């Protein structure tokens, strides 16, 4: 299964970025093999609007089934839900730790956005 984790850096030891749409990087992890891909989100970091929607489209195009992040706003949440991507908020620590927490069932999918739009 592929999961996306918002990240402040380009490796598994980087910290989880608490933002979704304006996260610096997404780490796409294959939970079965441990392989990962770095997806740069630079185009959305300073976007005037629509960052969450664009970021949602980017990870959907990678075949992601789950998103692990700190927080997710309403427009991004709707975009992800329409792409059948389950959102898990409250992820923290390193990307590697968040993935392990997910695999061990410590993180649960959110039912709705947990912040207002344009949360920074």
Image: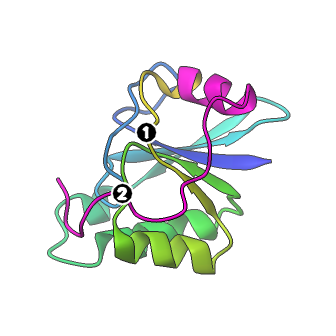
Helix, strand or loop under label 2: loop
Which color mode does the image show? rainbow
Q: Position of residue 54 (x, y in %)?
A: 40, 74
- The secondary structure that most of the magenta stretch takes on is loop
Q: Is residue 107 magenta?
A: yes
Seen at 19% across and 70% down, the residue is: 47
**Category of crowding for the residue at label 1, using alpha-carbon neighbours closer than 10 angstroms: few (below 14), some (14–19), many (at least 20):** some
Residue farthest to the right?
32
Q: Counting residues from the N terminus, which is met first, the one under dot 2 or under dot 1? A: 1
Task: Tell me which corner region of the image, top left, top right, bottom left or bottom right, holds residue 33.
Answer: top right
Q: Is residue 105 left or right of residue 86?
A: right
Q: Is residue 100 magenta?
A: yes
Boundaries of the magenta span: 97-120
Seen at 46% across and 69% down, the residue is: 77
| Location of residue 80 with respect to 104 vertically, above or below | below
* Circle on res. 23: none
**Category of crowding for the residue at label 2, using alpha-carbon neighbours closer than 10 angstroms: few (below 14), some (14–19), many (at least 20):** some
Q: Are marks 2 and 1 in contact (CB under 8 Å)?
A: yes
Q: Which residue is mark 1?
A: 90
Q: Position of residue 53 (x, y in %)?
A: 40, 76
Q: Position of residue 32 (x, y in %)?
A: 85, 35
Task: Tell me which corner region of the image, top left, top right, bottom left or bottom right, holds residue 55.
Answer: bottom left
Q: Is residue 102 left or right of residue 89?
A: right
| Location of residue 14 with respect to 102 vertically, above or below | above
Q: Which residue is mark 2?
A: 114
Numbered label tally: 2
Is residue 105 something that shows in the picture? yes
Task: Tell me which corner region of the image, top left, top right, bottom left or bottom right, holds residue 99.
Answer: top right
Is residue 57 something that shows in the picture? no
Q: Position of residue 76 (x, y in %)?
A: 41, 71
Residue farthest to the front?
111
């Amino acid at each position: 299964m592929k999961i996306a984790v918002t990240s402040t850096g380009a490796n598994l030891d980087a910290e989880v970025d608490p933002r979704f749409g304006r996260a610096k990087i997404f780490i796409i992890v294959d939970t079965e093999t441990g392989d990962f891909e770095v997806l740069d989100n630079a185009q959305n970091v300073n976007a005037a609007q629509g960052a969450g929607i664009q970021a949602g489209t980017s990870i959907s195009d990678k075949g992601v089934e789950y998103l692990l992040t700190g927080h997710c706003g309403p427009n991004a949440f709707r975009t992800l839900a329409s792409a059948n991507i389950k959102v898990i908020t409250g992820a923290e620590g390193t990307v590697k730790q968040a993935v392990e927490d997910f695999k061990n069932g410590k993180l649960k999918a959110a039912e709705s956005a947990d912040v207002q739009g344009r949360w920074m």
